[in-house]
Amino acid sequence: MDAAKAYFELGDLYASQVYIDKLQHILERDDFLTETQRIMLEMEQLRHEELKNKLKIINTEAAQAYQREDFNTAFDRFAETFDYMPTNPTIAINLMQTLVKGARVTDFSQRYVRASVKLLARSELDDDLMLRFKRYLAQIKALHPDVIPRRRPKEREVL
């Protein structure tokens, strides 16, 4: 249950669901577990489903705004989703893509794009996602050089 909650709080709904499913399997076979544990699992499943439904609505709104070329609204909705799922590389890519397509560069958008770049740079990405990440990163650096600050060279250690 703790693992399911931890992954849920990180926004990794897939991993959270894996642990919920494992716990559900155990509960179905184990008569020694308490009714409290069963209730806790039901509550966690309910929270999980409510968040999935909420995120589905927000993502639909983001996609619709993007299709209408309302990139500022799309960015805001993707950012809202990213708040719930800060470890999701697809949402991070969507934020970068939306900025490239025309969302306003503000302190708000810069913060989210920088968080997206940081996440994607340390994530294992499939070939398609890696290609998109590199392409959008290059475009952001070209269009909005202040959004992604250049790394400072590390100072040499003095002996």
Image (spheres, rainbow, N blue to C red):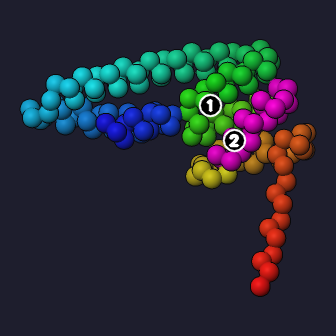
Residue drawn where x is 79% and y is 22% of the image: 71
* Residue under pointer 1: 82
Tag 2 or tag 1, which sits nearer the N-term? 1
Residue at the bottom extreme? 159
Vertical order, 25 against 119 (above or below)? above
Instruction: Report the side of 46 relative to 13 (left or right).
Output: left
For the magenta stretch, what is the residue range?
100-120
Q: Secondary structure at mark 1?
A: helix
Q: Amino acid at mark 1?
A: Phe
Q: Secondary structure at mark 2?
A: helix
Q: Which mark is residue 115?
A: 2
Task: Tell me if mark 1 has few (under 14), some (14-19) or many (20+) residues whose alpha carbon lies within 10 angstroms of its own.
Answer: many
Indicate whether residue 64 is drawn in magenta. Answer: no
Determine if residue 67 is in view.
no
Coordinates of residue 125 in the picture (x, y in percent): 60, 49
Quarter of the picture holding the C terminus: bottom right
Residue 119 belongs to the span the image colors magenta: yes
